[in-house]
Amino acid sequence: MLIFLVFSIFCCGQDQKTLSENSQNSEVSQVDQLFYIDGQLCQHVRRIFQDKRGNLWFGTNNYGIMRYDGKTLEYFNKNSGYDFGRIIGIVEDEKGNIWFGTYRGLSKYNLSDGEVEFSYFSEADGMVNNEIWSLIIDSKGIFWIGTMEGVCLFDGETFTPFPIPKAHVKDTTTNLSYNMITCIMEDKNGIYWFGTDGFGITRYDPSASLRSGDETFSFITKEDGLSDNNVTHILEDKKGDIWIGTMFGGISRYDGKSFTNYTQTGVVNGIEVWSIYEDKRGNIWFPAENAGVYCYNGKSFTNFSEKDGLNTNAIQSIYEDMEGRFWFGGWGGLFRFDGISFFSVTKEGPWD
């Protein structure tokens, strides 16, 4: 099968061109060698997402957006007229529009008369801050946007600031910003969980105001058993347990009453966990900085590292697509997992 790849000069150091498996003699510039590891697609893939049409989207750290439609890989970046910077979130709305959280604001992608169109939203449109760090669409279709300076809501037309109160903590040292919201999650009960930079987790229960004596906001910090107040990712699994990744305390699981900290107990190595993912079989996947990737099957953890072909120490995104293929993005580019070992996805593939 011939796979055509469209590359832009920002990542390739050359004019846009199409490469196929038959084009084995293409010249690689010095810029290519700087940006790629073993012919990788880009130096740093930060987010992975598949839309309802089956297109795979890859958000990079500073090289724009990549889209693979099953035949062609296309870059959208500065050299093709789109300047996004770091891509930190990718979501799809009910109309099939794709939205990107970037450090320059919120961007919307749609297709009109065969022409690619991107719309941009920023502080000038009512956002609280342009530098987005978390992005979700909730069960009601409302956007929750976590930024370097707090949260705002977006209904498709209007941005509304949503102040998040902070927990009282002994050490108020932050990693990047006092008001930063690192991650947002809506659980099965409609409660919103906000990860903060140094103040643990803030929970917001919209229905609490209807119940006498219940607080709308509640907090979880190290004093409650949280491994670290610098929270990076929150995931609710199919069983209802909450998995929490942190910057300095590794990963833990919360059953609603108590925490199990797998890093503190020595089961998991690596204190920095940036992403947590549950696959179709209910396995929990997560990377640990300088310690590879872990998979938890409900009973035990399996660690994958360089010995398994994972030649990077910093994975930041894990995704299982509709076809059951596993994709891993991070420093060093894009990787696949075939159930046994990892391999790089280069300019020539493999994609299938």
Image (spheres, rainbow, N blue to C red):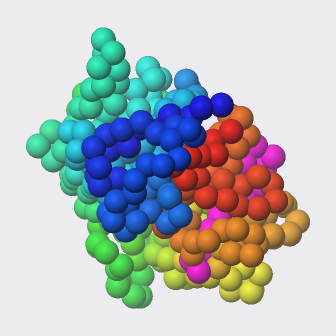
Residue 302 lies in magenta, yes or no?
no
Residue 284 lies in magenta, yes or no?
yes
Q: Residue at x 34, y 30 (%)?
A: 109
Q: Residue at x 47, y 53 (%)?
A: 41
Q: Decide: is 168 above or below 138.
A: below
Residue 308 quadrant: bottom right
Q: Is residue 198 left or right of residue 160?
A: right
Q: Decide: is 275 above or below 7.
A: below
Q: Is residue 47 left or right of residue 149?
A: right
Q: Is 158 or 343 nearer to us in this picture?
A: 343
Residue 294: in sight, yes or no? yes
* Image spot of residue 247 (x, y percent): 50, 77
* Image spot of residue 76 (x, y percent): 32, 40
Q: Magenta segment, principal secondary structure?
A: loop
Q: Residue reaching furthest top?
A: 113
Residue 133 quadrant: bottom left
Q: Residue reaching furthest left?
A: 124
Start and end of the magenta stretch? 279-290
* Image spot of residue 89 (x, y percent): 42, 49
Q: Decide: is 316 above or below 97.
A: below
Residue 56: in sight, yes or no? no
Q: The C terminus lies in which quarter of the figure?
A: top right
Q: Is residue 215 left or right of residue 173?
A: right
* Image spot of residue 269 (x, y percent): 68, 83
Q: Residue at x 59, y 52 (%)?
A: 345
Q: Residue at x 63, y 51 (%)?
A: 327
Q: Is residue 325 left or right of residue 233?
A: right
Q: The N terminus lies in which quarter of the figure?
A: top right
